[in-house]
Amino acid sequence: MNAETSNRILIGIVVGIVLAFIGVALFGAEMTRFEWLGQLFLDALKMLIVPLVVASMVVGITGLGDVRSLGRMGGTTVVYYFITTSLAVLLGIVLVNLIKPGVGMTLGTEIPDTVLGKETLGVADLILSFVSDNIVASMAQLDLLPIIVFSIFFGGVLTTLGEQGRPVITFFESLNEAIMKMVHLVMYLAPAGVFGLVAARFGAATGEPGGVAAMIGSVGKYMVTVLLGLGIHALVVLPLILWLVGGRNPMRYAADLATPLLASFSTASSSATLPLTLEAVEEKAGVPRRSAYFVLPLGATINMDGTALYEAVAAIFIAQAAGIPLSPMQQALIFATATLAAIGAAGIPQAGLVTMVIVLRAVGLPLEGIALILSIDWLLDRFRTTVNVWGDACGAAVVAKRLEQQPTEA
Ligand code: ASP
């Protein structure tokens, strides 16, 4: 897509968001009428995810040449994910201990519906979620993690087949080009789609008991803690890494990523945003395909800095509200499980709220605490998803640099 068209779409998205907020201010819950516009855009993006993930990962991996390079790429990527996620969790833990948003709050007595039936979620479930017994079923359910594992496996094996693997690789290269072209076309829907998504969700919030103000008022300090952490991570920590290790100008890179970042806020889904992230990182920012195609799909499902930070803050907030003091050992356990819970969360709206069960159970905190953060979760979800996508995008540039591939010019 040429720069002029993509800038026009970006301006359209910004106008869409502004109009949605003006509409919500004037018409409140009436704006939910536009929900279908958002749904149309979301469905169009989701429709592309499975073929795009398989094709881009196979192209990315087979483009590496041999399985040894795959090991190097994988290693560098995992180190990046691990370091940035750990920094995010650590930041969350420090802030929640300093601000103490839960002190003086009281817990409800009921476990919210969102986590009913998931009360026994544990680390073993997380490991099992990497592999599916039926890849077709995973595709049908947009369950990306096993699809990604399958694609890495498949692409890796293809590189060992020599001439015999060529036709299949060529097939996936063509498939990838075609799907990327479809992404470009779907992007024309983005301004109207983003308008619909924001108008409907924020419009609905004004119709909830007490409206947005009451919702924010009751857990305001908690919200400030999460947003402060997300802000520091996204505006200080990640840009520093991007600049020092990735060798890129963070402002310029963020500008290139503006469309997926705004889309992630509107959709609250890293997976649904993935087609736009791939497009922007490769075509606008000029990150080499091999890194982008590996780091981004994998990152959309397992590298969630925003979610990890939020899991840690929320768990400790619940402990404070329940009046349960946490020992340094328990805080360390929260550090580990918040990281795992973020890996386990799917890139879909409010997935982090469910995997929070892993963190709460690990330190014996009441699941009823989730009710406390439920009302505001849809809003925080949007911010943490934006940070998740930003973290993945920074990762693509950092990994590319580490592998000493000079970025091509956009
Ligand atoms: N909505 C988030 C994402 O898609 C996951 C979560 O934190 O709930 O990245």
Image (tube, rainbow, N blue to C red):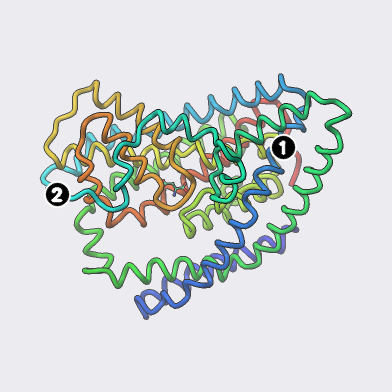
* Closer to us: 166 or 180: 166
- Which quarter of the rendering shows the N terminus? bottom right
- Horizontal arrangement in the rendering, residue 208 relative to residue 50 (left or right): left
- Identified at 78% across, 50% down, the residue is 177
Residue 98 — which label?
Answer: none
Task: Give residue 247's position: percent from left, percent from top.
Answer: 62, 32
Task: Give residue 202's position: percent from left, percent from top.
Answer: 38, 67
Outermost residue, front direction?
Answer: 133
For numbered disc 2, what is the local secondary structure?
Answer: loop
Residue identified by numbered label 1: 58
Which amino acid, by three-letter code, is at mark 2? Thr
* Closer to us: 18 or 182: 182
Residue 109 — which label?
Answer: 2
Q: Which mark is first along the chain, 1 or 2?
A: 1
Q: Is residue 118 above or below residue 73?
A: below
Q: Is residue 34 above or below residue 281?
A: below
- Identified at 56% across, 30% down, the residue is 244
